[in-house]
Amino acid sequence: MDSGYRVAVVGATGQVGTLMLRLLRERRFPAAEIVPFASERSAGRQLEDGLVVRGLDEESIKGFDVALFSAGGATSGEWAPRFAAAGATVIDNSSRWRMQEDVPLVVAEVNPEALESHHGIIANPNCSTMQMVVVLKPLYDAAGIERLVISTYQAVSGTGRRAVEELLDQSHALLHDSDIAPPEQYAHRIAFNALPHAGSFAEGEDHTDEERKLINETRKILDDASIRVSATCVRVPVLTGHSEAVNVQTREELSPEQARELLRAAPGVVVLDDPASAVYPMAIEAAGHDEVFVGRIRRDPGHERALDMWIVADNLHKGAATNAVQIAELLHERGLLGAGHAGQVA
Ligand SMILES: NC(=O)c1ccc[n+]([C@@H]2O[C@H](COP(=O)([O-])OP(=O)(O)OC[C@H]3O[C@@H](n4cnc5c(N)ncnc54)[C@H](OP(=O)(O)O)[C@@H]3O)[C@@H](O)[C@H]2O)c1
């Protein structure tokens, strides 16, 4: 590639899109041109870096090598296949394509080989799944995994910009004894609360879609449908950084010391595990970083082949934008971008 790729960022005015634009620049992705797209509401708006936002139409989407999407499932459903048909490889942050059989669901440190089989659209996993599988992969390779019991403590930025504003507005109102507007982003007040309701309940469902994503996406990424997964996803009044308490039941024996050693050598993982000195991962310290942090690694006293651990990452970084940009980098390194590689997803 002499002159660089033409890159589209769809959802460029949002939290994830803004960060993808920044990371493409900071990590020096070989782009000749980056074009930001958002809704018609934002078309014509100039971003901080001087780029001007465009609206999506049949003409404006032509001629891209790669398109990074973070504009919600409906926009991805409509526009990702059109970008792919016009020759781009799409990397999509929404849940729209993740479980489709011919769409690879890729975490850079875990299953990069899945990229080879792409047909124009590649899915970026859900943020809670993403950070967890980066930690699970080395444990899975060493000892297998039989069962996972997961409780998440998810930040409001995982819902979108408006949820961040809602938490801040409610907190301000409560601290200043003023009236609180009725919640719009969640079923109940999120400020100073914990909601056992991250995601939404489809009719007749006793799990949220977020919990189903954790279950299904974990099995797809680790390519092991036999793993049993139990998940409870909780929304907490944290701005950025998802935390997860994960109980990992392995097939073979694995001690906490062995797990720590494996994780210290794992790509993209930082072990912070000295609880006596109050050293463990925390959302406020993970925010702004690309790595996944793990600590509180200990034997589950209730099962001889299970470990408990605490996993934290920035949901906008590794949980979304970082992994999307890493995928673009891997595609470039493997010669999978550009003419001849894009296909069409049915
Ligand atoms: N936040 C996370 O932690 C996280 C993690 C993983 C995946 N994701 C996924 O990433 C996506 C975006 O999340 P976010 O937190 O960045 O949301 P956000 O801050 O609310 O941004 C949404 C973006 O989508 C654009 N958009 C909305 N409707 C559109 C339309 N009809 N056509 C074109 N663009 C449209 C918005 O443009 P306007 O500014 O013009 O409205 C904005 O750029 C979602 O699919 C989400 O599920 C998010």
Image (cartoon, rainbow, N blue to C red):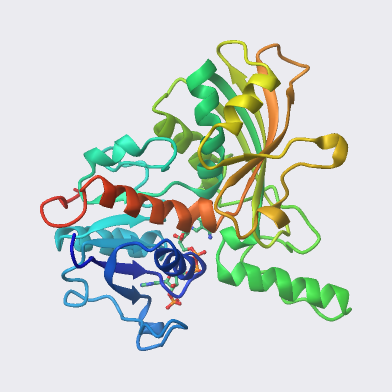
Quadrant in the picture for residue 49: bottom left
Please tell me which residue is depicted at 73% across the width and 49% down the height of the picture.
Answer: 282
Quarter that holds the N terminus: bottom left
The percent coordinates of residue 78 (x first, y second) are 28, 63
The mark tally for this picture is: 0
Q: Residue 39, can we see it?
A: yes
Q: Nearer the viewer, residue 184 or 14?
A: 14
The percent coordinates of residue 277 (x first, y second) are 86, 40
The percent coordinates of residue 223 (x first, y second) are 39, 27
Q: Residue 144, can we see it?
A: no
Q: Nearer the viewer, residue 16 or 215?
A: 16
Furthest-left residue in this view? 340
Please tell me which residue is depicted at 27% across the width and 75% down the height of the picture.
Answer: 56
Left or right side of 103 for 96: right
Quadrant in the picture for residue 112: top left
Q: Nearer the viewer, residue 132 or 337?
A: 337
Please tell me which residue is depicted at 41% across the width and 63% down the height of the picture.
Answer: 70
Furthest-front residue in this view? 2
Left or right side of 249 for 177: right
The percent coordinates of residue 344 (x first, y second) are 16, 51
Q: Is residue 172 above or below residue 257?
A: below
Left or right side of 60 for 215: right
